[in-house]
Image: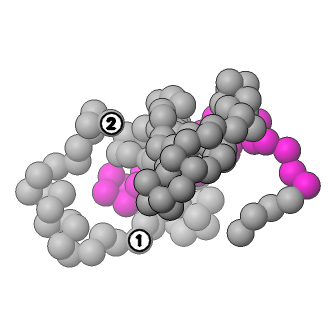
Amino acid sequence: MPISNVDLPVQVVLRWQSLVEPQTYRIKIDIPQWVREEMVTPTHMYCVPARRDMTLYPHTLTLGMAPGGIVKVWLGAGCLGYKEVGRYQAEVDPRGPYGGKSNGQYIPMEPANKAYIEKHGIPYGSW
């Protein structure tokens, strides 16, 4: 849902649980000024799916989390595509899952997922 009367992001704070490890990570990512400038720079182009010329803004930041605490951030939108902003390393959150309110208990993996990880391992370094 669109949000009005807010400025461009300066920082993103992320905390997540990697169920395959299991581990909890946290990170604060400063959004570079060049990204903020691109978010307000219009691009005029022909958008194939819409079948028309459009003025578009790269208004979407997408975050991807991977095992080992890796976070990648991309900037883009629809027909503009996405480009990588950066790759970051999160730190382990010693509080564990649920901010320490679960006595260190993580949600158990689905049996099929667990079997896959046991067979193929965790893909560290693939990001």
Q: Residues within 10 Å of mark 1 (few under 14, many from 20)?
A: few
Per the rendered image, the range of residues in magenta is 5-30
Residue of label 1:
107
Rendering quarter of residue 101: bottom right
Magenta segment includes 47: no
Element type at mark 1 = loop
What amino acid type should be assigned to the residue bearing mark 2? Trp
Image quarter of the C terminus: top left
| CA separation in Å, label 2 and label 1 | 24 Å
User: Front-most of 76 and 25?
Assistant: 76
What amino acid type should be assigned to the residue bearing mark 1? Ile
Rendering quarter of residue 113: bottom left
- In the image, is residue 2 above or below residue 60? below
Q: Residues within 10 Å of mark 2 (few under 14, many from 20)?
A: few
Element type at mark 2 = loop
Q: Residue furthest right?
A: 5
Instruction: Name the residue at 86% across, 59% down.
Output: 4
Instruction: Name the residue at 52% across, 39% down.
Output: 73
Q: Residue furthest front?
A: 52
Instruction: Name the residue at 8% across, 57% down.
Output: 119
Horizontal and vertical percent for residue 2?
75, 64
Rendering quarter of residue 66: top left
Image quarter of the N terminus: bottom right
Magenta segment includes 10: yes
